[in-house]
Amino acid sequence: MRAHILDMIDEDAGADGSIALCDVVRAAQERYATHPLFPGGRTRNYCTFTKVDLEARCEIERVPRSRPQRIRRAGDATPQWSRSAADGSFRDEVGYAE
């Protein structure tokens, strides 16, 4: 499943390097529908758990504020947080202080 998720990102991502999670899950359900490890095609949760594991290992990341949820390889985009030189606070890409 790990290879499936990473391959989907590498091969089917849009111009911004991201792909909708629902597309990744849908493709996994089609690909592993008859696989003996997934009786009855129970792949949705396994795909989601693997995605969370890849996030924890910093291999992929969620695209902030995307609906439906989109994922990409970690480090493919500019950082969403930047430090302001004036006051040292963090500001998100919209400019709201955190």
Image (cartoon, rainbow, N blue to C red):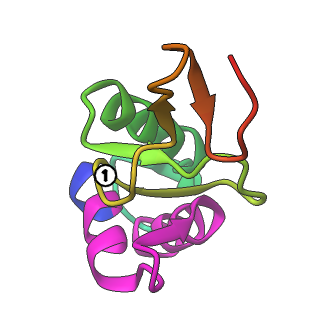
Q: Residue at x 40, y 72 (%)?
A: 17
Secondary structure mostly seen in magenta is helix
Q: Which of 96/23 is in front?
A: 96
Q: Which residue is mark 1?
A: 1
| Direction from residue 90 to residue 73 in the image, left or right | left
Q: Which of 67/96 is in front?
A: 96
Q: Residue at x 27, y 61 (%)?
A: 6
Q: Which of 74/96 is in front?
A: 96
Query: Horizontal and vertical percent for residue 57?
Result: 25, 28
| Direction from residue 83 to residue 35 in the image, left or right | left
Is residue 17 found inside the magenta-colored segment of the image? yes
Question: Which structural element holds mark 1?
Answer: loop
Is residue 26 found inside the magenta-colored segment of the image? yes
Where residue 20 sits, quadrant-wise, is: bottom right
The image shows residue 27, relative to residue 67, as above or below, that is below
Name the amino acid type tagged 1. Met
Quadrant including the C terminus = top right
Disc 1 crowd, CA 10 A, few/some/many (<14, 14-19, 20+): some
Query: Horizontal and vertical percent for residue 27?
Result: 50, 74
Q: Residue at x 53, y 41 (%)?
A: 48
Query: Horizontal and vertical percent for residue 82?
Result: 46, 34
Q: Which residues are magenta?
A: 5-33
The image shows residue 50, relative to residue 66, as above or below, that is above
Query: Horizontal and vertical percent for residue 96?
Result: 76, 31
